[in-house]
Image (cartoon, coloured by chain):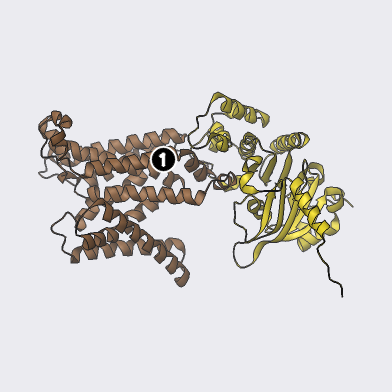
Amino acid sequence: MSLTLVSAKSVEDDRKARFESPLSVRGLTVSYGESPAIFSVDVTVRAGAMTAIVGPNGAGKSTLLKAALDVVKPLAGSVQIYGQPLAQMRDRIAYVPQRASVDWDFPTRVIDVVLMGMYRQLGLLGRVRARHRTLALDCLDRVGMRDFETRQIGQLSGGQQQRVFLARALAQQADIYVLDEPFAGVDAATEKAIIAVLQELRDAGRTVLAVHHDLTTVPDYFDDVILLNTQIVAAGPVADVFTEDNLQAAYGGRLATARVDPESVAG
Amino acid sequence: MGAEFVALSLPPILIGICVAVACALPGNFLVLRGQALIGDAISHVVLPGIVVAFLVTGVVAAGPMLAGAAIAAIVAVVAIEAIRRLGQIEAGAAMGVVFTAMFAGGVLLLEQSDTSSVHLDVEHALFGNLESLIWLDATGWASLFDVQALATLPVELPRMALALIVVAAFVWIFWRPLTLASFDEGFAQGVGLPTGAIGLGLVIVSAIAAVAAFDAVGSIIVIAMFICPPAAARMMTNRLTHQVAWSAGFATLAAVIGYVLAGYGPLWIGASASVSAAGMIATVSGLILAAAALCGPHRARNG
């Protein structure tokens, strides 16, 4: 009978890994009812990489993001941003929630939504000055939405709405970009535009973490992948982790309906 | 438009405007958050609290009334939760039961207790007594600058003006968090905003407006003003700042037109008595909403 002791070295390695990681969670558990949505999840996101969170419906992908950002309260677990508690590091994270989570009839214009991204700079009563407006327009430019500045957001297509959400995240001027299903219900042109912006961010040394639902594009778009089904099934570089076996383990019998293209699966 | 107007009509009109605007301002956010009926709920639930506060203290004063209303609101929340959990009934039905039951309880309590010495009865609870809030010492417009005369203004006017200032200050200071939390709660939490506290603050401020208004104008007008001016304003513009400005304008318009119509309208059509000002103000606000729904430039929605 063997007893595994946690060595001082492994504790030190973990501490170092978390200090270097833009986002690391340990033992994260969230429950909405009787059964857990995610259970004891450990994730260490690699800096300067694009990481996809992949898994079947109900696997807890969005929940993992929300718990990591303290949008839902976890039952247990800890979140660290560059080794620090989240509360001190909010300025370093930009968040793009699911497009469907918002009331698009809200009386607000495209430019106003982007300015919301600067809330932490502006505070309660800080005036919106020319430089804030310039930055907002610049962010809209990067997603190809500058001409829509004064449009009411409800008048946009789904893809355009998603681009405005991305522009708002860019206005947060963060180091880590966390996106929840950024390609859900958007047109092909928007998908290309969004992935180009995200790759630009990655090439500039930023970190991108996105919930992704289309298995066929994972190897093209992302560097790392986290396979989730309530618990972590596998995590690491796409070439090592995005294998038939791991996908089978994550999706079970549902893999056939997950539109997986065998050509695109590594290994 | 002389001494008689200043003494008899000016105070009720000003009180009506304060009530209408104080309810309409938070009403904008309640309507956008899909919580419009909270205004309705508050004005129902607080009645038994106000009656009990009167029975305990024997006076109709702002402090005890607010305290009674707050306690009633807490009782309501606990009762809703208990019915929902124990009875396995969905939240909407549980709320409906509690609000109407508490209001009915308040009405019964009012009828059974001796409140003849003060302005507190069933009709008052529904329609208020806006017309009776007159300024006896006023002798003309000059009285507005006469300290002695000003001291005899109906107490409801400064009380309601104070409530309006509190509400307006809340909306102004917390404009950004309110907007952000109402539009995109997930993102708001992501930037570290306490969205639960913001929602609670909005409800508390709405309750302050409702309780302060209740005494002067009754619950009918409160319910109407939380919903009608903001809903009408939404159809005039696609910008929140403009919507709030429109809603304040519509609320003011409803208060003035409603008061004048109630006082003089029946005379114009040959009837002898005037009708309830609060009821007429609520009716006018409903007509404004109907007009906006038919002719407003931004009626189309995208689903």
Q: Output the chain of dot 1.
A: B
* Residue at x 28%, y 40% (from the top left corner): B161
In the image as oriented, which residue stretches furthest toward the top? A130
Of residues B180 and B243, the one nearer the viewer is: B180
x then y, percent, for residue B132: 15, 45
Quarter the N terminus of chain B occupies: top left
Of residues A221 and B210, the one nearer the viewer is: B210
* Residue at x 84%, y 71% (from the top left corner): A3
Q: In which quarter of the image is residue B105?
A: bottom left
Of residues A185 and B117, the one nearer the viewer is: B117
Q: In this view, does B181 lie above or below A152?
A: below
Classify 10 Å Cα crowding around label 1: few (below 14), some (14-19), many (20 and above). many
Q: Can residue A162 be seen in this view?
A: yes
Q: In which quarter of the image is residue B21?
A: top left
* Residue at x 22%, y 45% (from the top left corner): B156
x then y, percent, for residue B256: 24, 36
Please give the residue where the numbered disc 1 appears in the rendered image: B171
* Residue at x 61%, y 44% (from the top left corner): A99
Q: In this view, does B260 lie to the left or right of A166?
A: left
Image chain in brown = B
Q: Is residue B19 left or right of residue B147?
A: right
x then y, percent, for residue A185: 66, 44
- The amino acid type of the residue labelled 1 equals Val
Number of numbered discs present? 1
Q: Is residue B134 left or right of residue B74?
A: left
x then y, percent, for residue B112: 19, 67
